Amino acid sequence: LAWILRTAAAAQALAAGVERLERMVEAMPLCTCTSFTRGATFSLPACRPCKPQVLHYEGFSSSVGVGADRHALCDWRPHWMLGRCKRSTDGVKYLGTFDSVDECQEACLAYSVQGQRCRSFTYHHPSFEDPKFRLTCFGVVHSGWVRQRENGVTSGRVFGPLVRLQRLLQWLLRALGTI
């Protein structure tokens, strides 16, 4: 019993350490040519332009992002009464209506409000089953990510310069059961 308690305590301590490390990585600038000072990110003039890496997942959304909050993002009216899905929650932000995934991605990369950055996005294609969501783009401002198959959407994850470390931290948190 003592071994189990020590193991559980060690797992909790490890999870807390991984979460602290993940918060530190999240606070880093997305590009290596930007600086982070007192909560403000600015580009250095001598740096060459850089962009964060975005991985696209055609036919997948995140079950801890838009998929989990879908009911809270819409008004009560059906689509034929001009009902729309343009609301935001604490973790999911409405970015707009766009004609392409690339425009949605650019809106996600440009989003930065009160220290929150867009970490992933979900774009709903014109073929999406719910007409209220078609052509809408939502950004997720937390780092949680669990892939879930869904037709008519394309999701993207935004990574900074430490892509492999970010993915390893997400895997560790999922393995420890904290996500």
Image (spheres, rainbow, N blue to C red):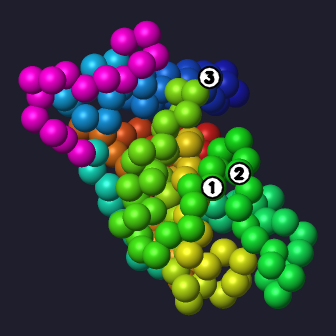
Q: Quadrant of residue 31?
A: top left
Query: Which segment did they paint magenta?
Result: 37-51
The residue positioned 71% from the left and 42% from the top of the image is: 90
**Secondary structure state at the residue bearing disc 1:** strand
Q: Is residue 94 left or right of residue 60?
A: right
* Residue 142 visible in image: yes
Spot occupied by residue 98 in the image (x, y as percentages of width and height): 50, 69
> For the residues carrying marks 3 and 1, which lies nearer the camera in this image?
1
Q: For mark 2, what is the residue?
A: 88
Position of 124 relative to 144 (above/below): below
Position of 171 relative to 71 (above/below): above
Q: Is residue 92 left or right of residue 81?
A: left
Q: Quadrant of residue 65?
A: bottom right
The residue positioned 42% from the left and 45% from the top of the image is: 110
Spot occupied by residue 102 in the image (x, y as percentages of width and height): 36, 66
The quarter of the rendered structure image containing the C terminus is top right
Position of 33 relative to 120 (above/below): above
Answer yes or no: do the residues labelled 2 and 1 have beta carbons within 8 Å? yes
> For the residues carrying marks 2 and 3, which lies nearer the camera in this image?
2
Position of 137 relative to 141 (above/below): below
The residue positioned 28% from the left and 45% from the top of the image is: 52
Please check the rendered image and state whether residue 87 is part of the magenta-colored stretch, yes or no: no
Spot occupied by residue 144 in the image (x, y as percentages of width and height): 55, 47
* Residue 7 visible in image: no
How many neighbours does mark 1 have within 10 angstroms: few (below 14), some (14-19), or many (20 or more)? many
Q: For mark 1, what is the residue?
A: 94
Q: Amino acid at mark 3?
A: Ala
Q: Main secondary structure of the magenta part?
A: loop
Q: For mark 3, what is the residue?
A: 9
Q: Amino acid at mark 1?
A: Tyr
